Image: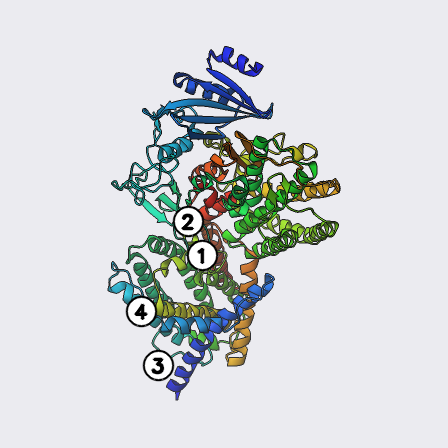
Amino acid sequence: MEYLFLILKVIIFIGLAPLLSGIITRIKNNLRFRKGPGIWQPYFNLFKLFRKDEVVSEQASWIFRSAPYIVFAATLTALMLVPALTAWPLPIFTGDFLTIIFLLSLGRFFLALAGLDPAATFGGMGSSREMFIASFVEPVVILAIFAVSLTAETTNLAIIAAFKAMHPATVLAAGALLLVTLAETSRIPIDNQETHLELTMIHEALILEYSGRSLGLLELAAYMKQILFFSLISLIVFPGWNDLASFLLKWLALGVIVAVVEISLAKMRLFRAVDWLSFAGILAIMAIMTLILGV
Amino acid sequence: MEKFLTDLETNYKLKSIKQLKNHDNEFYVEVAAAQFNAYCLALHKTFISTVMTMFAEEQKDHFIIYCGFAAEKMAAWIFVVLKVDKNKPEFPSIARQIYAANLFEREMREMFGLEPTGNPDGRRLRLHDEVWPEGNFPLRKDFGKEKDKALGEYRFSKVDGEGIFEVPVGPVHAGIIGPGHFRFSVAGEPIINLEIRLGFTHRGIEKLLEGKTVNEAVKLSEAVSGVSSVAHSWAFCQAAEKICGIKVPRSANYTRAIYLELERMYNHLAAIGGIALDVGFSQPAALAAIIKEALHQLNEKLTGSRFLKGTNVIGGAAKKISSEEEKLIWGTFSSLAKDFAELKEMLSGSVSFLDRVDTTGWLRKKSAEDFGVLGLSGRASGINFDLRQGFMPPYDDLDFKIATATTGDVLARLNLRLEEFAASISIIKKLLNSLSAETILAAKIENRAGFGLGVVEGARGPVLYWVSLNKSGKIERCKIVDPSFRSWQGLSYAVLDNIIPDFPVCNKSFDLSYAGNDL
């Protein structure tokens, strides 16, 4: 029965992940006086990509071919560990929040290699930028969740989620996570999903050489990663509200926030991204300080 | 002999062979090859003018090289003329003294096979070595059958050193933009060197123009650079009208100026929106697109063309602006005023946006002068040259201020565009107020042989057409200079020390034309 729930949960997550992106895009477009594509567009894109042939560089090795599957599998496993919708992550305890971060890093590692692999112009640039950003993102995520786990006195996310007490520290931690989420989902002000300018890309430059099913998998993994981060924030700020209806509401609320941030800011200069992420880091440290000082 | 030329020659101890005054404000001074460099340099220093145009023309038994300078104070054009023997097709290069001549000299070498002796750069510009065999010079009169000779290879300048990478970009890009190849040498993200290779849209316009009648040529000139069709066709018409002695009515010039300013407006707005979009600031970019679209629709209602084609004809303007159309312009302007104010507010009120454009893509005044960067990008770097001041007829009647800046960064070019957009609105309003019911077409249009220069300050800068007509009224030679031709080099210097992700916004702030450069 528990396994059934788990499978159902993952299906719901994967099924809704593209929709979340579609809705954010729609809100953004409406805010800037445009109609924009429908909210179902990401599904059409995925459907199109999964039916298409792939073009793979002759220089590419097995890393390039296998990276999409590794990224997808890693994200999927990480998603299973998030105790949203069900109070338990997996039927048996197999990992805590650090596992999620490591799984995502595993995907990122292979994607960065895959960017270098086909020896194309922009992939290497993308890899170097992605790792540069990641070196600031990962510590912040760890610190933020660490602050939350201090309140519940465990790193097991299931228990954290069940721990129904809001604390100033958790709000600060959630703020830090939100700033980082914009970087992790390659959104403005760190990256720009919509750009066609190869020279400015970070995540898009990495996957520029991919096509067809591989690209589809990578895009789906990106949608899943987005919903994973949104769920983490939701769990931390509003622990306990764990049913599907409240999650839909929480995802939507976060989506609106992200859309508004995206259209009201210009993308930062690449090296200024450090400022943004250090700010997130300071928020996370403040969260821990509040706990230690017992505010 | 003109007094200023006598003074110049005594001051610099120069000697000329022959002088000629043509159409009130064009002076041609023929010199010997040994005097060519010194004479050009003297004019360059005396009138603080860059090489405005430099080109060759083929005659029966010799080539003629013209090197044109602008004398701003006198509103005159001075050409140094050099005859080159066909058996020995070479001339002394002036690129080492006046760097702005470099591109023109390389152009003459590939188009006419005239060797600029002493020019440091032996590479081709537009006729790419990989597809265009050696020894074929398209602008020579005997060009026709391609001589089958060896193909070559282009050499990019190379930066060596530990950790230096080359990033080749283009000519095929991800967006809908013109084709150009950009070769970056980078140390990590900072740009150490940028070499821009263009010529992918070379259509041989100057060759196509040969043998055309002036009326056919007007249509062709509109297609040289699609977003500057008014500037180009007006410059051509001006040259042809000068030669044929056609008196253009005042109203026609006013009408032309109205269209020119409308062209400037949509171009500037495209660049402003592009700058915002290239730093991911999408809301103002969308607003700019809305205003731009309103202008294109206005253009279509006025002329039947969203890009204002077909407005200029030899002898005047193609169509009168009726009183209903006048109302339409006033109406559009008043409705876009609110949007434009909001756009300005959005851009200048955003810290994150200003952080991206301030101090980015800095073009020093000295570099701009060396490359001969004029027009909007030049004015942003402190070169206050604008053909509308003194060189173009209808603007003499108007009282308006040229917007200038000194910092030469993306922000300066953005602010200039915003100012010029507002200035264009007020210029058009003044022109509309003084439009009269008189005719817009010259009464007498006839063909004459001769040569002359037409100049217009387009949205990007000065557009120059030097035209020579033969007895049957057909074009013998037509030299086109689009401002983008020299400004591309300015861009390659402005991006140095910036990081690669900032290149697109630098590029957009210059907003140069590929087609105008490639001809």
Please provide percent x and percent y for residue B370. 46, 29
Q: Are marks 2 and 4 in contact (CB under 8 Å)?
A: no
Q: Which residue is mark 2?
A: B179
* Foreground pick, A146 / A177: A177
* Foreground pick, A174 / B39: B39
Please provide percent x and percent y for residue B365. 51, 31
Q: CA distance from mark 2 to mark 1?
A: 15 Å
Q: Which residue is mark 4?
A: A70
**For the residue labelled by badge 3, is the local secondary structure a helix, a strand or a loop?**
loop
Q: Which residue is mark 1?
A: A196
Q: Which residue is mark 3?
A: A92
Q: CA distance from mark 4 to mark 1?
A: 26 Å
Please tell me which residue is depicted at 63% across the width and 55% down the height of the picture.
Answer: B297
Q: CA distance from mark 3 to mark 2?
A: 58 Å
**Which chain contains the residue that carries disc 2?**
B
**Which chain contains the residue that carries disc 4?**
A
Q: Are marks 4 and 1 in contact (CB under 8 Å)?
A: no
Q: How many marks?
A: 4
